[in-house]
Amino acid sequence: MTNENKNPTSPPQPSPASGEGDKHSVAADVGALLTGLKTTLSEAFRPAVTTMYPEDKTPRSERYRGRHYLRRYDNGLERCIGCELCAAACPVGCILVIAAENTDENRVSPGERYAKTYEINMLRCIFCGYCEDACPVQAIVLGPEYELSDTSREKFIYTKEKLLEPLPPDVQARLTTKEKK
């Protein structure tokens, strides 16, 4: 009796033994295969876009944030005044600044204080740029250099000497002549 109560308007379902359902799925599979082959062949005949990395470098955007640099004034004095705002702004705490007082005999920066110790642990740095934004004298900047590989973890702690820009040529010449006298 239950066979007679079936809905007479529903279409009959093909049985797996009849093979009617396989025709549709085989046609769909062949269509998908042809679409994939078309994509593969169209890509195979396009010119390769490969950059020969160590010799040819891709351009960086103007706002790219790479390696840190401590800047100097034109007269050779360091810009960093040891305020430690960069260390406070750093979300991962990778910056260490220890300030010292400037003296008339040993003037390092134009302010009352200077950074006696300035270190950045580059392995912890996330290159967010908050240190650059927090600095009131624009002493720390993130440059375009992105090749920061080395052989040991200790070499990734950048000290003040490694971070400082070189002296301007005229200041370097004056210091050299003073040392000779």
Image (cartoon, rainbow, N blue to C red):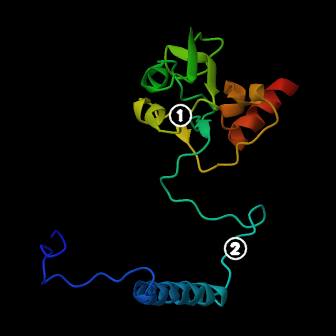
Q: Label 2, secondary structure: give it.
A: loop
Residue at point 55%, 85% (across, down):
33
**Percent from the top left, x then y, of residue 157?**
69, 26
**Percent from the top left, x then y, of residue 39?**
55, 85
**Percent from the top left, x then y, of residue 41?**
62, 89
Residue at point 55%, 42% (across, down):
142
- Label 1 crowd bin: few (<14), some (14–19), many (20+), radius 10 Å: many
Q: Label 1, secondary structure: give it.
A: strand
Q: Name the residue under label 2.
A: 50
Which is in the foreground here, disc 2 or disc 1?
2
Please identify the quarter of the rendering in which residue 51 is found.
bottom right
Please identify the quarter of the rendering in which residue 47 is found.
bottom right
Q: In this view, does 47 lie above or below 150?
A: below
Q: Mark 1 points at which residue?
A: 140
The one of 138 and 177 positioned closer to us in this rendering: 138
Q: Is residue 115 above or below residue 50?
A: above
